[in-house]
């Protein structure tokens, strides 16, 4: 604000200038004092100018008055870590369903689309999120590709790129620094990337799955300050004690809030300031039916967290985590981003205010969101060359019989952790034959321009009993990932994914059974949230019928290629030992 704008706020706070809006009789949740009390809130344009207890109000003039009749009022909810791409929605279609749930700010890491399109992908997210009635802040992806030389994505982002991109509007810092081994081992690439943002005083978002003891301390000394990869509550306590922000996650696939909250409470840590809630990867139907950050609040309170502390974890805590000084509180001088809800158990959102304007009420948008038309939304980014069925078979040194081969084993049917295992598999005419086993093949096909890599492996406990599934939404390279028994099915799926520009395709007996299209960068739908949600739910139900038992079957295939999650994954260059950052020989 300039001095004239500040002067107007002062005049409105003193009653010398009409406030543009007054909210009366609100049960205010004060995140600073930890109190709840009846208050009136005066707003001038985008800012709060006064907060006063009802009994002490001098009834200053206001152009408009809304009586909240004792309903709870809190700061607008902030999602401390998410990927808009994981909703498979454009930024404006995501806003359409998140705002009525009380979310007024998201801290988004667009590393999914940047892995495909580089700077063009970042610019697309910024352009598609302009002038929305919510704050969509972005972080620059720190690991594109996620681990250098162990996968090939559609772009390579280095320190010079990041230094330039940090000057773009609504960029807060570095996105999740996934190459935790590169940080701990002081590898030059990660040191240079971190230093660019560190020297500018920017936020450094972390990613530290399984790190404990001196390795966790080393990672923190390297610069990152947060972690959303805390799956077990007892590990969250160590991170909190060491000053790390724990962004407790409740995605459509990984549900960690309950464990973290229960462990925090068991140690008597009632109100850690470095604790937030986030969604990370949440599907449209999940948001529409269960909620967004308001659902995280509900889960945290059900697990035993005090409601005021839960509110702090989605308002002032994340605002202070990323350095947003005038967000996260209902107080003079703060942006008038606020949420009205009915109780401290279910957090049913009734009204959402963004910068002093009522933008949603009782689940419906009051503010029109314009659908943008951008060139990237019409571009096919799936560039695979013509491949043959034979390229989707694992050739062996033996002609017939049984052979030992190293592959990937899922620990259980829901988690993404995988381990190395040696299998004994049948061989027929020099190729591995899995038709009589419960194992599946996995193929990673590089789908980016200028690269034709194909990597094949074997996976156990993927639990797909029949058919095949392929996707171009595959963390983090977003190469084409196909899980199958019959190479004929894999070939049909690969060709279909190329034709439609990406998405998720299911095949069986050489024919396509169903699909959902993500033509924008192979990961985003160009349809609204409701239609996209229905399409994803239909695919999820079909995959469950095929044997997948996890909460988000559509996301399960992508976890195989996530080479920053322990212990063994697969990329377009081979099977990867995540902990030691090396390629594993199959035979």
Image (spheres, helix red, strand yellow):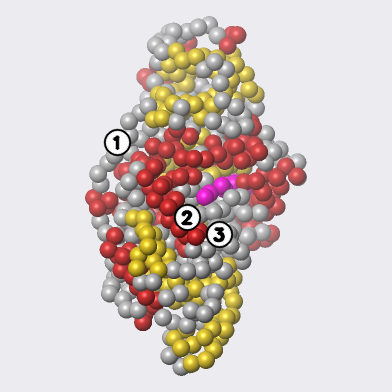
In this view of the protein, which residue sits in the foreground, 46 or 447?
447
**Viewer-nearest of discs 2 and 1:** 2
Category of crowding for the residue at label 1, using alpha-carbon neighbours closer than 10 angstroms: few (below 14), some (14–19), many (at least 20): few
- What residue is shown at x 44% (from left), y 45% (from top)? 284
Q: Position of residue 560 (x, y in %)?
A: 49, 66
- The segment highlighted magenta reads 242-252
**Viewer-nearest of discs 3 and 1:** 3
In this view of the protein, which residue sits in the foreground, 189 or 240?
240
- What residue is shown at x 59% (from left), y 13% (from top)? 53
Q: Which mark is residue 541?
A: 2
- What residue is shown at x 39% (from left), y 50% (from top)? 535
In this view of the protein, which residue sits in the foreground, 127 or 489?
489
- What residue is shown at x 49% (from left), y 16% (from top)? 23
In what element is the residue under mark 1?
A: loop
Q: Earlier in the sequence, mark 2 or mark 1?
A: 1
Against 195, is 309 above or below?
above
Instruction: Estimate the spatial distance between the alpha carbons at disc 3 and disc 2, rounded to whole Å.
Output: 10 Å
Picture quarter with the N terminus: top left
565 drawn magenta = no
Q: Position of residue 60 (x, y in %)?
A: 47, 8
Category of crowding for the residue at label 3, using alpha-carbon neighbours closer than 10 angstroms: few (below 14), some (14–19), many (at least 20): some
Q: Which mark is residue 370?
A: 1
Q: Is residue 151 visible?
A: no
In what element is the residue under mark 3?
A: loop
Count of number-bearing discs = 3
Q: Earlier in the sequence, mark 3 or mark 1?
A: 1
Q: Which mark is residue 549?
A: 3
Residues at marks 3 and 1 touching, judged by CB atoms closer than 8 Å: no
């Amino acid at each position: 604000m300039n001095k004239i704008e500040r002067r107007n706020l002062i005049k409105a706070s003193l009653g010398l200038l009409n406030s543009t809006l007054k909210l009366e009789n609100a049960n205010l949740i004060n995140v600073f004092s930890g109190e709840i009390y009846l208050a009136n809130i005066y707003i001038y344009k985008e800012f709060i100018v006064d907060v006063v207890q009802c009994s002490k109000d001098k009834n200053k003039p206001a152009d408009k008055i809304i009586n909240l009749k004792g309903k709870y009022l809190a700061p607008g909810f902030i999602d401390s870590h998410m990927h808009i791409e994981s909703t498979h929605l454009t930024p404006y279609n995501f806003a359409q369903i998140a705002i009525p749930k009380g979310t007024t700010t998201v801290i988004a890491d667009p590393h999914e689309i940047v892995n495909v399109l580089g700077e063009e992908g970042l610019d697309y997210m910024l352009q598609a999120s302009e002038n929305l009635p919510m704050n969509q802040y972005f972080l620059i992806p720190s690991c594109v590709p996620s681990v250098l030389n162990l996968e090939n994505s559609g772009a390579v982002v280095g320190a010079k790129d990041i230094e330039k991109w940090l000057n773009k509007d609504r960029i807060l810092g570095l996105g999740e620094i996934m190459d935790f081994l590169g940080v701990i081992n002081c590898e030059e690439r990660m040191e240079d990337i971190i230093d660019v943002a560190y020297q500018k005083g920017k936020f450094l978002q972390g990613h530290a799955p399984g790190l404990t003891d001196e390795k966790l301390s080393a990672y923190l000394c390297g610069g990152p300050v947060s972690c959303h990869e805390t799956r077990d509550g007892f590990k969250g306590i160590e991170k909190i004690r060491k000053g790390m922000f724990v962004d407790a996650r409740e995605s459509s696939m990984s549900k960690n809030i309950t464990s973290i909250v229960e462990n925090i409470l068991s140690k008597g840590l009632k109100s850690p300031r470095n604790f937030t809630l986030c969604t990370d990867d949440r599907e449209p139907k999940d948001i529409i039916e269960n909620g967004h950050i308001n659902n995280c609040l509900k889960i945290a309170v059900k697990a035993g967290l005090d409601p005021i502390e839960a509110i702090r974890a989605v308002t002032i805590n994340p605002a202070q985590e990323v350095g947003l000084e005038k967000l996260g509180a209902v107080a003079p001088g703060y942006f008038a981003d606020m949420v009205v809800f009915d109780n401290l158990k279910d957090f049913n959102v009734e009204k959402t205010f963004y910068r002093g304007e009522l933008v949603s009420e009782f689940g419906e948008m009051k503010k029109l969101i314009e659908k943008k038309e951008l060139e990237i939304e019409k571009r096919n980014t799936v560039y695979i060359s013509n491949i043959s069925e034979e390229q989707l078979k694992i050739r062996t040194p033996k002609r017939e019989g049984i052979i030992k081969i190293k592959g990937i084993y899922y620990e259980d049917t829901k988690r993404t952790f995988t381990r190395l295992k040696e299998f004994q598999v049948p061989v027929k005419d020099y190729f591995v034959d899995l038709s009589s086993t419960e194992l599946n093949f996995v193929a990673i096909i590089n789908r980016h321009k200028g690269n034709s890599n194909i990597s094949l492996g074997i996976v156990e406990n993927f639990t797909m009993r029949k058919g095949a599934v392929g996707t171009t939404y595959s963390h983090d390279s977003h190469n084409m990932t196909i899980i199958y028994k019959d190479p004929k099915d894999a070939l049909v799926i690969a060709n279909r994914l190329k034709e439609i520009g990406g998405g998720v395709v299911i095949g069986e007996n050489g024919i396509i059974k169903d699909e959902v299209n993500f033509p924008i960068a192979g990961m985003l739908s160009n349809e609204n949230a409701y239609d996209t949600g229905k399409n994803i739910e239909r695919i999820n139900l079909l995959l469950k019928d095929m044997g997948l038992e996890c909460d988000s079957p559509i996301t399960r295939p992508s976890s195989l290629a996530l080479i920053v999650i322990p212990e063994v994954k697969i990329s377009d260059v081979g099977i990867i030992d995540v902990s030691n950052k090396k390629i594993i020989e199959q035979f």
